Image (cartoon, rainbow, N blue to C red):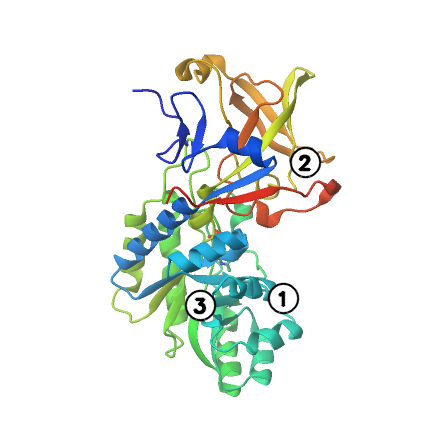
Amino acid sequence: MTMELWWERADLAYNEKNELIFANHNVHQYAKQLGTPLFLYSAERILANIKRLEQALHATGLKSRVFYALKANRYSPLLTFIKSSTGCGIDACAPAEVRRAMGCGFLASDISYTGTSVSNADLDFLTGLEGLKLNCDGLSMLRRIGKKSPGREIGIRINPAMGTGYGENELLRYSGEKPTKFGIYASELNQAIEIAAHYNLTITRIHFHTGCGYLNDQLEIWEEILKTCLKMIRKIPSVQAVNLGGGLGVPLTPKDAHLDLDQWSTVIQRVFNGTEYEINVEPGTFIAKDAGLLVLEANTVEKKSGKRFIGVNGGFNLTMEPVHYQLPAEPVLCHFQGNKEETFAPAHLSPATFAGNINEALDILYDDLPFPEISEGSLLALINAGAYTSSMHSNHCMRGEFNECLLLDSL
Ligand SMILES: Cc1ncc(COP(=O)(O)O)c(C=O)c1O
């Protein structure tokens, strides 16, 4: 049996010719045809991720529905595929996202909207869509909806003042000791209930999302967060559905284990057992992140002051998470010469720093990664590039162009 690298799996692995195969496609050949920078997404992996999540929710015995967080990846073919192949709804956070989802076949009633700093113009559009699940992020939004559209059903986003995300990374927590901009705190909940009553709004949904990227080690704190939220939810007897947000992580380094979905669903069951709530979740990362690659060309390989730099034809403007959130996105070779065991033997690896093509000091995609020899012109694939990568791109230095493709034919 040949060695397996930590990120390899049935649909993402080297073949016997040392070529990277993703969703039945030879990544090197495909990228040569389409051109880099190139995002490749696997429809099959997206579907598998959604199914695993739906099964885990089903195991709780509670009524449930998954909403895909469109902000993670809004590529239209991907959205159309999700609409036509699954029962997923959409989590949107801006009117343009709602329009994009509806353009890909989702009905307003399939869409849950949770945004911040929502303007009156946004509200004119959102309240005009019958069936849209509109969640209020604060008292101001609640009051303005009440004035504009009294008597309707409404959701509210709550903030339990606790959060969890990827490991110890505080940048990924949306809620904690320090006040954040998200949701209504316990200290303002009574006021929210009064405003809703004043405008005859019925609060039927509670929403919270407290961080991104949590894995097994964070499930204990996640359970405490759910319990704290349940105490707040119980103050509102009209609630029918509880949206636990997204935040489920995927392994980003060899040290990370896959989130144990059995444990995850047991936590939900323990907390909500005996309630009649429909449970909703709205992940982006869990559904799309490990279903995408960003293929780049290594155009410059040289040492600077003794440090090995590998310069590539894309920068943090195409993959912002490593820089903004310090989340690793590991580059891997699209093909290599020689024997796999030898190529990846620790003795044959040496630290490499992957530098983008943006004139900013921060534009380092990975610092000091133990990496095999590589020559200029080789192609690299950044794994875990299916979420918050193309969707967050910018045109900084006028290098915002890329190609994108949804691989469907492995289904
Ligand atoms: C309100 C809300 N829901 C869902 C998500 C999706 O989070 P994730 O991709 O971590 O699952 C986010 C991400 O920022 C969010 O803000």
Q: Position of residue 342 (x, y in %)?
A: 42, 13
Q: Label 1, label 2: how many angstroms apart (C-alpha)?
A: 29 Å
Q: Position of residue 188 (x, y in %)?
A: 52, 72
Q: Is residue 167 positioned above or below 150 on the image?
A: above
Nearer the camera: disc 3 or disc 1: 3
Q: Label 3, label 1: how many angstroms apart (C-alpha)?
A: 23 Å
Q: Position of residue 380 (x, y in %)?
A: 55, 28
**Can you identify the residue that label 3 sits on?**
110
Q: Is residue 28 visible?
A: yes
**Can you identify the residue that label 1 sits on?**
117
Q: Position of residue 65 (x, y in %)?
A: 36, 63
Between 267 and 257, the one lying in front of the other is 257
**Can you identify the residue that label 2 sits on?**
362
- The three-letter amino acid code for the residue at tag 2 is Leu
Between 202 and 124, the one lying in front of the other is 124
Badge 2 marks a residue whose secondary structure is loop
Between 6 and 98, the one lying in front of the other is 98
